[in-house]
Image (tube, rainbow, N blue to C red):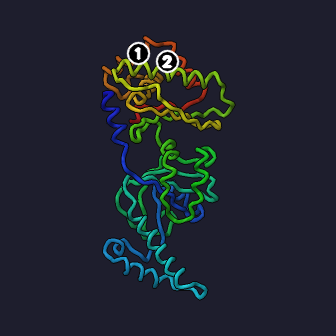
Amino acid sequence: MTIQDFIDQIESEEKERKYWFVRTDKGHHYTTYLENNFIAIGWDYVTVNDIVNSSVEDIKAKISRHEPIKPEQSEISYKMKISGIYNKIIRFNELKKGDIIVIPNEGSESLAFGEIVENYIYVENNGEYGCVYHKRREVKWHRNGQINSFDPHLMFIKRNMHTISEVKSFQPYIDNILNHLYKRGDNSHYVIDVNLTDDISLRAFNGLTSSIEKLSVIINDEFNLDEDVNNTAIKLQLQSPGNIEIISKGSTLMILAAFLSFTSCDNKKDVNLDPQTKIHFEKLQQENPETVDACLNAFDELETNKFELDKM
């Protein structure tokens, strides 16, 4: 893989996708979903055939037959209930391949983050994995953990009480959990997880940011990118553990991430880069040993998860 291939691959992952928060019956199905790579929705009497071939009116009429009005309900509230059930089922059907799914456990103390695998509902009628719901979507789970280990903004995601809710406003925080390197619009984002549980020393933090600043200038010049690296921004979520998010326009930051991954790799022969790029990176490392060592030492001191090129 050449550097241009690498950049193109990062940029190709910038796609229109939606972000969804899916309830798990008060956490009852959280572990089942997570361990068996799916999510599901109830109201089994509405079949996939109904969703595909029946009109809105016919589906709502079927829901009404299975959800009779209660004596204390007003006609308006009953119609809202029927419409609400219909909308949830249709949203579940409209999930697209690549859409991001977030699910909570009981009490929303933990969250899991995954990605829809296919563009269709599949049906399981035998209660497989202890879940009675028939309509299911396959999910590839990427990460899970306690909610207080993620960005504090995600504490508010659990306010969504519906079975399935779109949560686009949480996209920046979810992206940082799922990706160490990505592009949104004109900006490249390089997210460095900090796993240190002790206090973060000012020396280590300054060593990291100053060396990244210097290396950005070097790479911008070396690859003739002519980008304004002086406008690089940084966002911190450093409650220990936390992360450092570096944001910059253009390709310099993406190449920097690849370079740092390469230099920190123990077995460079296995890195998924073409020989010419490896030689180029080795030359840069040899010409700038102090700056590179300062950055890698800061990585070690902050106990970071280094971005791994071989997972690209």
Indicate the amino acid at tag 2.
Val
Asked which secondary structure carries label 2, the reply is helix
Residue at image location 50% in from the left, 61% down from the top: 165
Which of 97 and 56 lies nearest the eye of the viewer? 56
Which of 274 and 61 lies nearest the eye of the viewer? 61
Residue at image location 37% in from the left, 50% down from the top: 16
Quadrant (top left, top right, bottom left, bottom right) of the N terminus: top left
Asked which secondary structure carries label 1, the reply is helix
Crowding at mark 1 (Cα within 10 Å: few <14, some 14-19, many 20+): some
Residues at discs 2 and 1 in contact (Cβ within 8 Å)? yes
Is residue 31 positioned above or below 278 on the image? below
Label 2 sits on residue: 292
Please provide percent x and percent y for residue 37.
Answer: 46, 55
Label 1 sits on residue: 284
Please provide percent x and percent y for residue 270.
Answer: 38, 26
Residue at image location 35% in from the left, 75% down from the top: 50
